Image: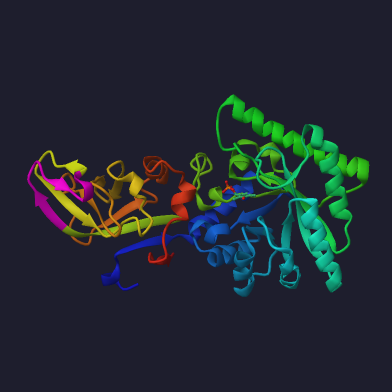
Amino acid sequence: MNDLQKRTWVEISLGNIKHNYEAIRSDIPSGCRFLGVVKADAYGHGALRVASLLQDCGADYLAVSCLDEALELRDGGITMPVLILGHTPWQYTETLIENNITQTVTCLAKAEEYSAAAEQLGRELTIHIKVDTGMSRLGFLCDGSLSEEGIGHIVRACRLPGLRAEGIYTHFAVSDESGEENRAYTRRQFSLFLHVVEELRDRYGVSFSLRHCANSGAVVNYPEMALDMVRPGLLLYGYGDSSHRLGLKPGMRFVTTVTTIKHYEPGTFISYGRKYETKRRTRVGVLAVGYADGLPRAASGKCSFATRWGPVPQIGTICMDMCMADLTDVYEAEVGTEVELFGEHADINTLSAAAGTIPYELLCSVTKRVPRVYK
Ligand SMILES: *Cc1c(COP(=O)(O)O)cnc(C)c1O
């Protein structure tokens, strides 16, 4: 990117992501495998770039959400194992096998469809069984009165021809949240998962080489739940409540520039809707970023950004392509000055809280017109 074209961009530090990978690796038990979650374009950081990095670093597995994301990795030359966490229609069984992609299986009916398709081809599809232990989204239900039936269905799924059941996993709903109720809920999910795995092994002789459940929250808060493999996403990119404790660094900096500076008298309304009125003579900077770049409009007037001389409050409604900031107290700022929306100097948690959302959503909301600059 030419310096004069610098409007708004994200700087992605592969060095920081590598640092985070190594920090997490050294925090988990030795021998525990590492699956890096690179769905949603690696939380906006660029799936292929991050996947190549993880492959070079010696990570064991990758996970994506859907077939297209998995094929992007294979087409880009990624050869390490890739797990699809979501649904793939059975009609694509051949594509999955052909590309050596592992598919999650969430119920017996789907297992039967994949099995029939794989058998027809005379090939084998590698699968991971998903158990619903309390997220109430995907997976075999094995709780309470459904225990016998759920476990029975998993056994039947694993014994179907054309399927190779390599792994079994579950997903936590509140492993990243504090409070005794949440901790009890996570522990209950974990013990149910262990119970299912033990029943399968002891009563039916069905066992798996990869048992996994630890998302970012569990990697940090429940190290005893690492099992055979951990499955972090957010943490890898350097975000999340405990990222500081592990010394993790943000993978992404969202940066814009000041394009115009004007002075307004007290009592001037700024931007759409006349939501903000100046209280003093105000030096207003027009920033080259708006909600069409991924700055949430819901944060209008509730957030502040970082400059090298200190924070600048955002004022008035955030527009599609622009927003305004009060530069009065940062007199050094001029046209062309860089303003960080989130990154090392502006905490993404503050911006996401102002917008009433979570860092995850901000990371994957940076839009297509924002160039990614890799460091
Ligand atoms: C997205 C996802 C993860 C990663 O979650 P983080 O909170 O980002 O660590 C792990 N497992 C599953 C099944 C997911 O969908």
Residue ID at (87%, 44%):
152
Q: Give the percent coordinates (x, y) of residue 41.
A: 53, 61
Residue ID at (62%, 42%):
219
Q: Nearer the viewer, residue 283 or 109?
A: 109
Q: Give the percent coordinates (x, y) of residue 331.
A: 15, 49
86 displayed left or right of 283: right
Residue 332 visible within the image: no
79 displayed left or right of 317: right
Q: Nearer the viewer, residue 105 or 112?
A: 112
Location of residue 224 (image quadrant): top right
Magenta includes 269? yes
The residue positioned farthest toward the left in the image shown: 265
Q: Nearer the viewer, residue 319 or 216?
A: 319
349 displayed left or right of 102: left
Part of the protein shown in magenta: 261-274
87 displayed left or right of 53: right
* Quadrant location, the C terminus: bottom left
Residue ID at (70%, 63%):
89
Q: Give the percent coordinates (x, y) of residue 276.
A: 19, 42
Q: Give the percent coordinates (x, y) of residue 91.
A: 73, 68
Q: Is residue 372 above or below residue 196?
A: below
